[in-house]
Image (tube, helix red, strand yellow):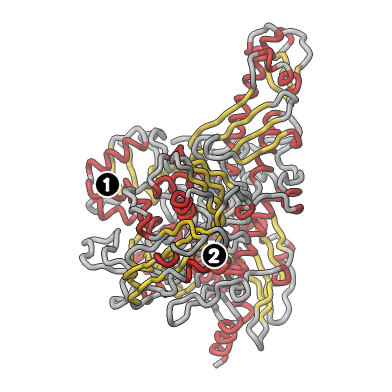
């Protein structure tokens, strides 16, 4: 099981859960499982998010692996100047 | 857990870290470099855009009939020529490029004309009749959030709140970050300071206005030359707006005269393409400076409340901030980045930030160097300064006591790996600047700053020519020295002199997708791709040498630009240089090249500490910057002169933002200072020589340890200067810019 932490604004769409435990071996799995469990998250996730795995931020990497003990954060999609 | 947190061992470099001449230097000082407006084509038309004179107005009708009839006019476009795209992410861009039902800000494009000359186009604009119904407007972020504020978008419902609102407002989204229990943390505090801050909108101030040349053929294929930070983005967005297949549009990036984030979207390019499609001729469209100010994307203005508590020893027990950023007429201000970065410099048990993204009747904001972070740092670092002073602690010591380090859970969530904040603080503490005496009416300020840095999709191609020279094609416009950096990294890897490598920016048909030059990503991500492409070419060259020597490829190694037998058992062949292998390429298997197509991850976050001395004229309130030093972690400085330039550039732009620059709106909602005479960016006499100290804490996510450096440098200056001015003036300054009238007023009120 992977423990993923949602940023504050997503919490409400996930029935108030800030931390979610689910089976996921990579980023695509993680996002798919989140959408299945919390359909209200779908619009936010589909708009694009960043996923931080052990402190490294990924933007569009479906197959970035997630280990069971990885630290995972779902964050807003990052952009710079 | 992966070993991302592992500290990387420093390696020795031969070419990387040197300071060779920049490859674009001669072109730029001789005028040979071709910027956006320098491109022309046979039969080219000149285009101009008609813009709304109102901050907020319903467009009842647009009559172009008299303009179309004017001799020399070849095409006129309005909202009717732009179908709203299906893709949700393009809808607001489409509405911003050409107004539809309403003009949402002073300068919003309403119609455009292409004619045989600018004079004819100018006359044609006068003949377009637009009937407006002027509506109430709002340009201030706090006013826009009030219950009775004029509403820009009737369909806008605040995202990120429960229950979902059933009424429209100007608040597009609420963001929240943090961890721990701030109420408990404040209860544990011995001292709590609360303050509110405001910053005004500033423009990136790039010297080159937006410019492009569009040429659409009758076969549906098009070419676009433009000044941009990302021509692949321009291609995709324009194709989406014009209903084209992506590969039918080829976009070539011109040389770029500054961008700083402001050229990461489109404004005029789709309009020029639509005009060219209608006219059947190439169309050149160049913004005037007035248009750049009124209708491109400045950064947000902001309003922030900060509350920080500490115990009597100076350890922070809780920190909270509410940030409100207006992002112009459409959702998308960088407030979430403000909320994420606000407390990133500190190791906090209890922290919460809330950000509100607000729309107003101003041009749609665009990214500006570490978007959202400088305004947040201004507010937070000002209160940090006050807390330190409250207990008589040196502000650097106070920051060291509370600094984020490797293993700190960041205020936005993830745990930090190896980071350089502590190193910048220690370095600044022992620097001569910190120990130098101050005179009367002078003050010293320090502040820290953080930025994420990104990687992203990247594609490069590296070709070895038959004479042993190397040509590298990258797909990111060179905004901060990337050609020099790529040449250095390719030379390092291949073992050839810097001068043997030429890097060019290829057009969109030549390479796979490259993300925009943003997020301080290029030296990191394109550099990584360059190293991989060079390594691929080396593999091929080793294989060719193995064939020539008739030994297994495993028995060949690459050292200092030569293929060599791996050891005595491999044979006693004379090493072959890159040039020798290249010379025989035609006979050994054909061209030698290396490629890399990847989504680069592993960008390392970056921190900086800035120190500044100012003098405040007690009679006028004028602020003079006397001395400025930047301390920043670069991971590995590939071309140190460029790194220093990035540090200095961020500080210089921060000086402007802190002291002078400001979008000023009249009662009518129109911009009052749309030009460099009235909107004053710093010029040479306004700045001291900005000293720099490069620290190198290698990023484990890059083969050479590189971290992006372009954005972090603008995060601390607003706060550092405000802390210095507050010390010199004897009163806390909470509203930027600290222009003479504002400083004088604060001093007089303090005396009273």
Residue linked to disc 1: A42
Total marks shown come to: 2
Q: Position of residue B77 (x, y in %)?
A: 42, 58
Mark 1 neighbour class, 10 Å CA radius: few under 14, some 14 to 19, many 20 or more = some
Residue B120's disc number? 2
- Looking at the image, which residue is at 28% across and 76% down? B147
Q: Position of residue B336 (x, y in %)?
A: 41, 58
- Looking at the image, which residue is at 63% across and 83% down? B621
Mark 2 neighbour class, 10 Å CA radius: few under 14, some 14 to 19, many 20 or more = many
Residue B543 falls in which quadrant of the image? top right
Residue B707 falls in which quadrant of the image? top right
- Looking at the image, which residue is at 70% across and 37% down? B502
- In the image, taking residue B255 as reference, residue B15 lies left or right, namely right
Q: CA distance from mark 2 to mark 1?
A: 51 Å
Looking at the picture, tell me which residue is in the foreground, B588 or B197: B588
- Label 1 marks a residue whose chain is A
Looking at the picture, does residue B105 appear above or below residue B5? below
């Amino acid at each position: 099981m992977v423990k993923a932490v949602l940023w504050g604004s997503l919490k409400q769409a996930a029935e108030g859960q800030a931390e979610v435990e689910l089976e996921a071996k990579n980023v695509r799995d993680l996002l798919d499982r989140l959408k299945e469990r919390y359909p209200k998250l779908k619009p936010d996730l589909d708009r694009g998010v960043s996923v931080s795995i052990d402190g490294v931020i990924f933007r569009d990497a479906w197959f970035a692996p997630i280990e069971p003990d990885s630290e995972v954060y779902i964050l807003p999609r990052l952009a710079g100047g | 857990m992966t070993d991302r947190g592992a500290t990387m061992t420093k390696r020795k470099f031969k070419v990387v870290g040197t300071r060779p001449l920049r490859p674009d230097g001669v072109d730029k000082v001789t005028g040979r470099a071709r910027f956006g407006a320098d491109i022309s084509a046979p039969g080219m038309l000149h285009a101009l855009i008609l813009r709304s004179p109102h901050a907020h107005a319903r467009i009842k009708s647009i009559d172009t009939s008299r303009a179309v009839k004017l001799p020399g006019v070849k095409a006129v476009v309005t909202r009717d020529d732009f179908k709203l795209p299906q893709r949700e992410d393009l809808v607001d861009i489409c509405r911003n490029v050409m107004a539809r039902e309403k003009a949402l800000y002073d300068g919003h494009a309403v119609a455009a004309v292409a004619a045989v000359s600018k004079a004819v186009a100018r006359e044609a604009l006068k003949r377009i009749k637009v009937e407006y119904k002027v509506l109430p407007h709002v340009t201030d972020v706090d006013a826009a959030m009030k219950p009775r504020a004029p509403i820009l978008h009737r369909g806008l419902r605040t995202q990120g709140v429960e229950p979902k609102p059933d009424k429209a407002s100007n608040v597009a989204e609420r963001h929240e970050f943090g961890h721990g229990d701030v109420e408990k943390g404040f209860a544990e505090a011995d001292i709590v300071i609360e303050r509110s801050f405001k910053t005004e909108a500033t423009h990136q101030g790039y010297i080159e206005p937006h410019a492009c040349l569009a040429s659409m053929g009758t076969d549906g294929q098009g070419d676009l030359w433009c000044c941009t930070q990302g021509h692949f983005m321009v291609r995709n967005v324009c194709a989406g707006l014009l209903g084209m297949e992506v590969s039918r549009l080829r976009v070539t990036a011109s040389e770029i005269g500054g961008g700083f984030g402001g050229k990461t979207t489109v404004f005029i390019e789709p309009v020029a393409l639509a005009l060219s499609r209608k006219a059947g001729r190439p169309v050149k469209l160049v913004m005037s400076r007035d248009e750049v100010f009124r209708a491109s994307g400045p950064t947000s203005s902001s309003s922030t409340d900060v509350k920080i508590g500490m115990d009597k020893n100076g350890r922070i027990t809780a920190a909270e901030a509410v940030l409100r950023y207006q992002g112009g007429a459409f959702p998308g201000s960088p407030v979430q980045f403000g909320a994420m970065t606000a407390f990133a410099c500190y190791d906090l048990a209890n922290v919460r930030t809330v950000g509100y993204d607000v729309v107003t009747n101003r041009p749609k904001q665009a990214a500006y160097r570490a978007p959202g972070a400088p305004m947040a740092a201004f507010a937070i670092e000002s209160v940090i300064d006050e807390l330190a002073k409250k207990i008589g602690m040196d502000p650097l010591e106070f920051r060291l006591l509370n600094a984020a380090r490797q293993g700190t859970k960041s205020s936005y969530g993830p745990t930090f790996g190896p980071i350089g904040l502590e190193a910048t603080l220690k370095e600044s503490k022992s620097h001569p600047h910190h120990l130098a005496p101050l005179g009367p009416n002078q003050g010293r300020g320090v502040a820290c700053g953080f930025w994420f840095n990104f990687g992203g999709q990247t594609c490069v191609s590296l070709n070895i020519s038959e004479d042993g020279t190397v040509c590298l094609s990258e797909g990111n416009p060179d905004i901060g020295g990337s050609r020099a950096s790529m040449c250095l990294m390719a030379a390092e890897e291949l073992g050839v002199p810097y001068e043997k490598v030429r890097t060019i920016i290829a057009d969109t048909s030549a390479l796979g997708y490259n993300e925009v030059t943003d997020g301080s990503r290029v030296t990191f991500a394109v550099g990584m791709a360059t190293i991989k492409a060079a390594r691929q070419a080396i593999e091929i060259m080793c294989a060719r040498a193995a064939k020539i020597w008739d030994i297994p490829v495993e028995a060949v190694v690459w050292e200092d630009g030569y293929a060599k037998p791996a050891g005595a058992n491999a044979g006693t062949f004379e090493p072959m240089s890159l040039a020798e292998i290249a010379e025989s390429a035609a006979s050994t298997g054909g061209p030698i090249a290396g490629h890399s197509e990847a989504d680069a991850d592993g960008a390392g976050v970056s921190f900086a500490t800035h120190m500044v001395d100012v003098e405040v004229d007690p009679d006028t309130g004028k602020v003079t910057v006397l001395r400025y030093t930047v301390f920043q972690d670069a991971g590995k400085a590939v071309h140190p002169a460029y790194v220093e330039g990035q540090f200095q550039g961020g500080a210089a732009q921060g000086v402007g933002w802190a002291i002078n620059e400001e979008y000023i709106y009249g009662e009518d909602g129109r911009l009052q200072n749309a030009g460099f005479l009235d909107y004053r960016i710093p010029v040479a006499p306004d700045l001291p020589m900005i000293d720099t100290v490069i620290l190198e804490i290698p990023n484990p996510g890059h083969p050479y340890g590189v971290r992006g450096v372009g954005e972090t440098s603008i995060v601390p200056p607003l706060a550092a200067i405000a802390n210095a001015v507050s010390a010199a003036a004897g009163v806390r300054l909470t509203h930027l810019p600290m222009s003479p009238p504002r400083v004088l007023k604060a001093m007089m009120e303090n005396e009273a």
